[in-house]
Amino acid sequence: MKINFILILMSIIFFSCSKTNNIKEKNSMEKIISTEIIDETVKELELKFPESDRELLKRGVQLTGEFWLAEDGSPDDFKNFCINNYLQDKKLLMERFSKNLETVYGNFIRISTVMQFPVHVGNDPLLPVDEVFASWSPFARLNDDWFGNKLALVLHLNFPYYSLDERDEKGLQWSDAENAAVNLGLNFASRVPGKLQQAANEISTRSEMYISEYNIYMNNIVDENGKKYFPEDMRLISHWGLRDELKSNYADKSDTGILKQKLIYDLMLRIINQDIPQEFINAKGNDYCPVNNKFFKNGKETAFERENDRRYACLLDIFNAERAFDQYSPLYPDAIKRAFDQGLEMTFERVETIFTTFLSADVNAELAKLISKRLGRPLQAYDIWYDGFKTRGSISEDELTAKTAKLFPDAEALEKYLPQILQHLGFAKERADEICKHVAVDAARGSGHAMGAGIRGDVSRLRVRIPETGLNYNGFNVAMHEFGHNVEQTISLYNIDNYLNSGIPNTAFTEALAFIFQKRDLSVLGFDKNTGLDSELTTLDLYWGALEIMGVALVDMYAWKWMYANPDATPEQLKKAITDIAKDVWNRYFAPITGVENSPILAIYSHMISYPLYLAAYPVGHLIEFQLEQHLENKHFASEIDRIFSIGHRSPDTWMTKATGSKLSAKSFIKAAADAVKALQ
Ligand SMILES: [Zn+2]
């Protein structure tokens, strides 16, 4: 997981995405600049600056006209504004924006980091104000301010917008300065009013709360005979906790393991279908049998109210909020374009093609057969969560924890040790010290995350939960993942001359380095992981996981297409649509390899409700990881990491080509899986 600059910007752009249907906009995007005014303005500017690139000049004026509202002035004011603010030589203007945006973004991130500190770090009890401090964002009003004083309009006039296709096509030829100008033009891509943004934040928080309070008391789950299988104090969140419990039962080879898995699967179906009793959610005491949907109070079967489609009502609220943003976003006029073209910098269609190609690969059926053989039974729908490829070699987890707890009793010890980790991975001592100077470690309240800096001089933060008894092995594994993020965050900020080129194309790229670091955790601890078939098992574990999450991501993606095609749908209609979509994706890609038909299980993910349209980033991260790993083979790891993460913010294909010599594709990952299946057969 990673919280950083990009994520914070994205959270403004599309995560915190909601607004209720009934907030009607008074000051909507009322455009007053006609094509005639645009043409006149362009003509005058051409006379004034005969040397200027006509195409770019026109593009800048057009976009400025798109964003110009009645409140900004009359059409004549618009013309004068363009003539007075257009510069032929943009060097100094770009320097100003670069320096000032670094100051604004960097310090806003600093402020947010301080506001969120009690919620993210430590063990002290939280005050009620802590949540308010944490959810206040200095970014919320930035659009209002910079469009209001027309700085954002000066930016669009002088640094025209390039589409994703153009950036993919021309990116390799651009100099650093040209690329910086293009990146600058990507800022302020929508003019959503702060008030709307605030309303959206509230809906988003409400959906997150709905999900974060969706717990199931597992000891109250019974089978058809009233028998209980789960421990007294087990409280699991849907869907993550339920899924992880289902996974952990692969270790139990007895019939009980399978019974528990089936009960969890049935429970998930009841949640998708919303026939789970409302009273049973997040409440202890009464029993529920998900197999026959019967509810018991004091041991007696009782009638109940079902949850009644609230899950889908939440998603519709988010959809309506996003739709309200559409008119303020001329460059990305719907939520799908904002999530994909803008956020992921890959089109919906491109991601869809990559996923469907991956989901149709020949190796999938062989892998499914291998899993069925290892399980000694035909596959069930829930085996998309098969966990039997995980390996710790011959070292027990206790032995590993003994080592990590001793090495890392607290955050300070871990921070001190970071340069040694980099040296182990092949970085020279001096370079390791230099990178780690910009990384600080805090003891996290949650399981862990990494936060990048937005300004040179600030540090990126590695957060991981460190118990009183010292860091356990699981925590160290998380810390290695987060440290991968920190290394990316540091190189891609400090090793790049122009701030406007800093960063990476999107969050999937930083996830890739995080995965690469995480995989090397045992080697860093001095246990050589690459013995026997461990690396093949790890590949298959990741591959099977990628298949599952690509299926889930497709359901999320198609659900949004459906909502845009049916904007007046009721929650009940949306439920039916999503269930049908989930079954359709299942029947296309999972039924042929598992032999199970019509399962709607891919609709269970909670991200769909609390972080809509984000799931695609995870499997894309794994694709990048495998393409990088293949490139890194037989090369000097440290110097390549340094070189690759200094490429900066370019379009994904430009970045991948500069990094590995070829565009982003699923080939490496599929090939690695095919090799691994062969090795294991
Ligand atoms: Zn991560």
Image: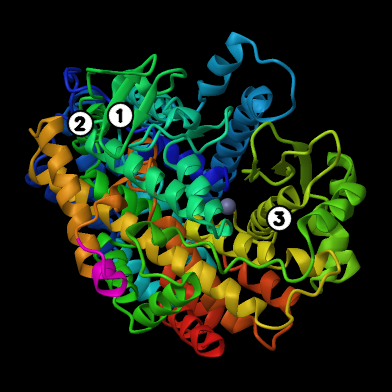
Circle 1 Cα neighbour tier, 10 Å, few/some/many (<14 / 14–19 / ≥20): many
Q: Are marks 3 and 2 in contact (CB under 8 Å)?
A: no
Q: Quadrant of residue 381?
A: bottom left
**Seen in the image, is 151 located left or right of residue 555?**
right
Query: In 3D space, how far apart are the residues under numbered discs 2 and 1 (Cα atoms)?
Result: 7 Å
Query: In 3D space, how far apart are the residues under numbered discs 3 and 1 (Cα atoms)?
Result: 35 Å
| Residue 128 picture location, percent across and down | 58, 9
Q: Residue at x 53, y 84 (%)?
A: 676
Please name whichever residue, 490 or 613, is drawn nearer the observer in this view of the structure: 613
Q: Which label's residue is closer to the chain start, 3 or 2?
A: 2
Q: Would you name the residue on which mark 1 appears?
A: 18
Q: Are marks 2 and 1 in contact (CB under 8 Å)?
A: yes
Q: Residue furthest front?
A: 225
Examine the structure image and report whether residue 462 is included in the region drawn in magenta: no
* Region of the chain picked out in magenta, as a range: 589-597
Say which amino acid is labelled 1: Ser
Q: Would you name the residue on which mark 2 appears?
A: 320
| Residue 188 picture location, percent across and down | 38, 41
User: Quick one: SS at disc 1?
Assistant: loop
